[in-house]
Image (tube, helix red, strand yellow):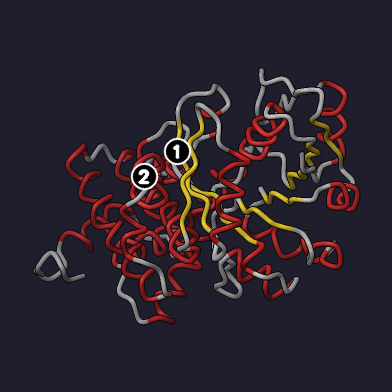
């Protein structure tokens, strides 16, 4: 069986590293903090990010990035989006011939590039050797083997099917897609709307408002995604509305948590400083805001979330701005 390197051993990277090892693949997980990597290797467990989930014998951890990349015939990227370019640049001479599967959900703020575009720009990979794996899959539940679905998207049908076969289990169902743009855009943008859902929860706005937010948020995601070249039908699937629903409603959602805390009066810095893991939606909101301006796409919810995060707009004013916009048909923005 092919050797697999998981680059990034947060809760999600660790969950899938365990899943792959349990299927019999030789797996090595790279963790950028040496202290954490050494503890994982010694204790056969990621006690910081995924406690009570012991490692199979064929899963090892390391802080040596070159060792991990050299080991893996397939590379699984489980990094925060803002760290992808910096980390892959250190080993790009070894990455060009590797097959890469991305678990990362985000858009690079400085370039407005999706993860596949960053790898093309930095490493020169072929999209035929790249897949994005995305869907409503919180690590806290998948690690307990609760049923979940996900989508493997690639411009190569052959590689998408290969990824499907690699990850499929009796509790982890993998679908394939050829719409790489749509799956990457849905994965990134749903985190922006989830911050809005958290704000709604923090303001105790009720179920009606959250349903409206998710529905109109999906329209924004679809509108921008299609302008970037995505298939609109992708956003009605597992990696679109499916991921959006779980991220907006789950107690496990870090992005929803950020919004909830903002609505309770905490500053963004205070919230981020007290979180162990990254809430991708914060940086993605900035990227989405500027990408929408560049593509001339109107995204009213995203605009208000951007102003709340980065311009100190009151959530109450943001809500008022959305609710008092000029009357429109449902197809309008």
Sequence-wise, which precedes: disc 1 or disc 2?
Answer: 1
Q: Quadrant of residue 56?
A: top right
Which element carries disc 1, helix, strand or loop?
strand
Q: Nearer the viewer, residue 301 or 20?
A: 20
Disc ID at residue 149: 1
Are the residues at dot 1 and dot 2 in contact (C-beta closer than 8 Å)?
A: yes
Outermost residue, front side: 158
- At 59% from the left edge and 67% from the top edge, which residue is drawn? 108
**The N terminus: image quadrant:** top right
Q: Nearer the viewer, residue 264 or 280?
A: 280
Q: CA distance from mark 1 to mark 2?
A: 9 Å
- At 45% from the left edge and 63% from the top edge, which residue is drawn? 179
Location of residue 10 with respect to 186 vertically, above or below: above
Which element carries disc 2, helix, strand or loop?
helix
- At 34% from the left edge and 55% from the top edge, which residue is drawn? 314
**The C terminus: image quadrant:** bottom left
Disc ID at residue 296: none
Q: How many marks?
A: 2
Q: Nearer the viewer, residue 280 or 120?
A: 120
CA neighbours of label 1 inside 10 A, class few (<14), some (14 to 19), many (20+): some
Q: Is residue 120 left or right of residue 263?
A: right
Q: Is residue 82 left or right of residue 234?
A: right
Q: Residue 175 in the image: x percent, y percent?
A: 46, 46
Labels 1, 2: front one: 1
Residue position for label 2: 242
Q: Residue 194 in the image: x percent, y percent?
A: 39, 48
Q: Residue 192 in the image: x percent, y percent?
A: 42, 55
Q: Residue 22 in the image: x percent, y percent?
A: 69, 26
Q: Is residue 10 left or right of residue 231?
A: right
- At 30% from the left edge and 74% from the top edge, which residue is drawn? 298
């Amino acid at each position: 069986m092919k050797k697999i390197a998981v680059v990034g051993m947060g809760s999600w990277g660790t969950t899938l590293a365990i899943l792959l090892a349990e299927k019999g693949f030789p797996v090595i997980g790279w963790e950028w903090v040496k202290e954490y990597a050494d503890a994982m290797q010694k204790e056969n467990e990621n006690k910081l990010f995924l406690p009570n989930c012991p490692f199979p014998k064929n899963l090892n951890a390391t802080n040596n990035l070159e060792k991990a990349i050299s080991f893996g015939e397939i590379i699984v990227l489980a990094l925060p989006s803002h760290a992808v370019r910096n980390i892959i640049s250190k080993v790009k001479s070894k990455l060009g011939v590797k097959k890469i599967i991305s678990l990362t959900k985000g858009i690079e703020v400085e370039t407005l590039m999706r993860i596949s575009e960053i790898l093309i720009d930095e490493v020169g990979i072929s999209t035929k050797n790249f897949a994005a794996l995305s869907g409503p899959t919180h690590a806290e539940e998948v690690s307990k083997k609760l049923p979940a679905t996900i989508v493997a998207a690639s411009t190569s049908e052959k590689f998408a099917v290969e990824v499907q076969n690699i990850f499929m289990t009796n509790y982890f169902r993998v679908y394939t897609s050829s719409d790489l743009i749509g799956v990457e855009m849905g994965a990134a943008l749903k985190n922006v709307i989830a911050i809005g859902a958290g704000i709604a929860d923090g303001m105790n706005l009720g179920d009606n408002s959250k349903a409206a937010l998710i529905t109109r948020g999906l329209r924004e995601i679809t509108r921008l995604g299609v302008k970037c070249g995505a298939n609109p039908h992708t956003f009605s699937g597992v990696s679109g509305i499916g991921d959006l629903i779980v991220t907006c409603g789950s107690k496990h959602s870090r992005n929803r948590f950020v919004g909830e805390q903002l609505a309770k009066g905490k500053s963004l810095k205070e919230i981020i400083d007290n979180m162990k893991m990254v809430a991708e939606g914060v940086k993605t909101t900035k990227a989405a805001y500027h990408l929408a301006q560049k593509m001339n796409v109107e995204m009213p919810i995203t605009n208000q979330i951007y102003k709340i995060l980065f311009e100190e707009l009151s959530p109450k004013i943001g809500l008022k701005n959305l609710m008092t916009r000029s009357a429109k048909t449902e197809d309008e923005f």
